[in-house]
Image (cartoon, rainbow, N blue to C red):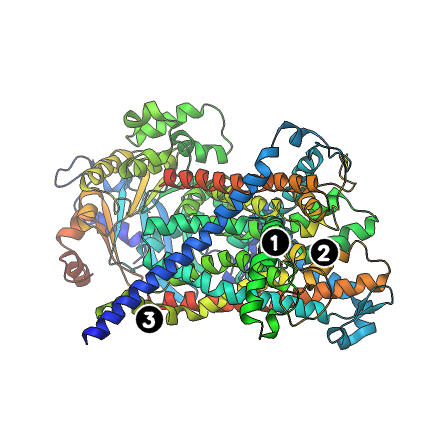
Amino acid sequence: MNLHSGWRKFLNAFMLGLTAIFAFATVSVLFLILGYLIYHGGKNVNWSFFTELPKPVGEQGGGMANAIVGTAKLLSVALLIGAPAGIFSGVYLSEFGGKAPNFFVRYMADLLNGVPSIVIGIFAYAIVVLPAGHFSTLAGGFALGVMMIPIILRSTEQFLKAVPRTLREGAMALGASKWRTILTVVVPAAASGIITGIMLALARIAGETAPLLFTAFSNRYSSPGFNEPIASLPVMIYTYAIGPYQDWHEQAWTAGLVLLGLVFVLNVATRLVFARKTAAAR
Amino acid sequence: MNGASIVQKHQNLEPVHLGQKDIPLVELPIGTIKPQFKISNLKVSYGAKEVLHGVDLDVFANVVTALIGPSGCGKSTFLRSLNRMTEVVRGTQVEGEILLDNENVFRMDVVKLRRRVGMVFQRPNPFPKSIFDNVAYGLRINGHHDSLSEAVEHSLRRAALWDEVKGQLHKSAYALSGGQQQRLCIARALAVNPEVLLLDEPCSALDPITTAKIEELLFQLKSSCTIVIVTHNMQQAARASDFTAFLLDGQLVEYQSTRKLFTTPSDPRTEAYITGRFG
Amino acid sequence: MLERVNATGLTPSFRPLRIYWERLRRGDEIAHVLTLIFASTVIGVTALLVYQLWIQSALSRQKFGWAFFATRVWDPVGGQFGALPFLYGTVVTSAIALLLAVPLGLGTAIFLSEFSAKRISDALAFLVDLLAAVPSVIYGLLGIFVLAPLLRVWVEPVLRSQFGFLPFFRGPAYGVGFLAAGLTLAIMVVPFIVSVSREVLISVPREQREAALALGATRWETISRAVVPFAKTGILGSVFLALARALGETMAVTMVIGNDPKISASLFAPGYSIAAVIANEFTEATGSLYLSALIELGLVLFLLTFVLNGLARLLVLATAQRGGLLE
């Protein structure tokens, strides 16, 4: 009996220790990633990385200004496509839709959310690149925008639904029509949540590479307008990492650090701001 | 029991005392009481379930009418029918007739109806906006953009909240206490100058001191508008109302001057309820 | 008697129409239709995606039929396309990934939801969320410059000398290959297993734990005999979700798998995956048959993830509802 109970206690302690080791191993990957990126990429983060174009092979220096601007442009196009579609559809699900249409829309959005990003790339290629006959910022932004739609849709729906019914009734009892109620009371009450959803969606697509490979393609120079191939940070990291040159590898590390910084800042800032907002509303 | 017979019944009664507790503050000759709402054969069902089985009742102008009854008796549903808030819930069916100043509310524009018939809810529900914007909300959606600040001040004064918030009109309404929030909601409803104010258990989430303040407020407000209040608190109905209607299982059991209903109820079920034998 | 206006004048059945007109006049119906249009675009986009994959792959589907999935040859010059090497690579790397990621992820989830204090749990869960947000190209970057050299110099020689009797651990150590891709994928999907499993474990009703604890079970016995069995469908759902991620993952795999359409028993050997071949060859695909074959691979990938995601959602939902019913 004593032996048995001793074994049970040992097993309990052992499993506690084991799962703790697993947990810290999992989390330590994050610090490994950060550490390597800072170690390899940190030394080359300087002004010229953000302001200069890539130098031809063999020449030292140069930056990724075109890729940084490119990522910004691609994200803007994606936002213009993904945000309205996601927000309005979310409003439909939360405020207007019946049971059956809602199920259908949600099902399709979940389906879209699960599609591998490379397949989204094929889709954008077939829809935008093939008819136009060339790669473009629009095609890349379209691919990323399509990826944003289901994320924004679900978060918008979720936060709108969390707005208490009493607020809606308060507005309607004052004679506000339904759309007035939604526009002036429901959406403002859910605004910080909706914005959080959009920022997290942006953070998620900012690092996407696969859907850009054959939509935005890449460009060694700046890309004026929205109708030409355009460089982006993720694609540059990929190209430079698999390239054969030592200085490309260093640039890839630096670009990786910048990209990860962007993604993390978006994530952390959004969560912090949002946490404060919800606390204030209570 | 229809509206006309109630009026006739009252003519046989002693003069109605429109006052608090047992002090008759105003004696109103019975002939001057006029009905504001005339409700006949009101039936409401949610889906297949009928919760009001044909209620006839007249609500009189410039008095406080209390609706009492055990929970689930349909008193809130009745109240919500008066400004067609029942339509907000999907699958609700309303039958019968409700006349507001002899005008059928189901044929009125619902926006205009709700402007004339304001509502205050069980839990304070200020919008996540500033105090000022809360009160101005109804005015703005009705297209009034001039002299908003006078109107806001006036409404806050009527709701007895002005002195407490005048320095912080642009603070969030969530910074107020529960009782202040409820008075803010009353001010918000008063801002559009409704003829009727419906209150759905407005004090159920509030402490006794705040409750007393709101009852006092109702007493002051009834000179300028008709008040219908749903309450599960019989003492509150006895204190603050002039007429009381007792509903049970979706039917109107008794409708009397408050004094009479609580002293000499004519229906045994009413007596059972007010003496606490059920509900 | 008081004068009465005649009864409503409208039979109740007409009332919905009246309400509809009233709403139309107020703009509610316009808002409804406007949001409905946007909601329909979500359906439209998804349907169009499936449609495009289907018609753009028609050429390849008609030419090769089911043999596409049983052919080992991928010869763009000769016009011969078989998906077998890519299917093999995708399945093998995903299997390695799950083998490693499931214990690690589940252990982490158990620690976070059962053993650790709430503050530690929340902090670690936040870090895991950040880990899930790391772009896959960055995993690829570390895979190619850190993991692959490590495997080539240290891990693979040791595995060969110790477990060389197994066919998986033979042949030259390249660094890049199935093992590198599988390991990278494992690290990438752990956060997904952790966050979904943690949610599922947290949703297990407290009564389930208390019943076991009240019978004198230790913490671990409670977990292994009450909590995990209760949550097992949801945990399985998280595994399917992770598998769907692993199958569709592109960049990191492309960078470390070696990109060689061969089927080898050895995990050290370079291989290829469906997503990787699309990423590498799509822009270079000359000729419509070549492109069509690549798009058919995309269709396969879509169908695989579609089925897995569907199953995963059902399982997670089933557990959540069971928890909800008992509460």
Residue at image position (63%, 42%) is A79
The chain ID associated with circle 1 is: C
Which residue position holds label 3? C226
- Specify whether C312 is left or right of A219: left
Amino acid beneath label 3: Ala
Residue C52 location, x and y as percent? 75, 61
The chain ID associated with circle 2 is: C
> Helix, strand, or loop for circle 1?
helix
| Marker count (numbered) | 3
Mark drawn on residue C279: 2
Give above or below for C22 relative to A266.
below
Inter-mark Cα distance, 2 to 3: 45 Å
Choose between B183 and C308: the one closer to the eye: C308
The chain ID associated with circle 3 is: C
Give above or below for C250 relative to C312.
above
The disc, 1 or 2, on the residue closer to the chain's N-terminal end is: 1
Mark drawn on residue C149: 1
Give above or below for C305 relative to C139.
below
Q: Quadrant of the N terminus of chain B?
A: bottom left
Residue A176: in sight, yes or no? no
Label 3 vs label 1, nearer the camera: 1
Amino acid beneath label 2: Ala
Label 1 vs label 2, nearer the camera: 1
The disc, 2 or 3, on the residue closer to the chain's N-terminal end is: 3
Amino acid beneath label 1: Pro
Indicate the quadrant where residue B132 lies: top left
Q: Quadrant of the C terminus of chain B?
A: bottom left
Same chain assignment for discs 3 and 1: yes
Choose between B212 and B116: the one closer to the eye: B212
Inter-mark Cα distance, 3 to 1: 43 Å
- Specify whether C16 is left or right of B147: right
Q: Residues within 10 Å of mark 1 (few under 14, many from 20)?
A: some
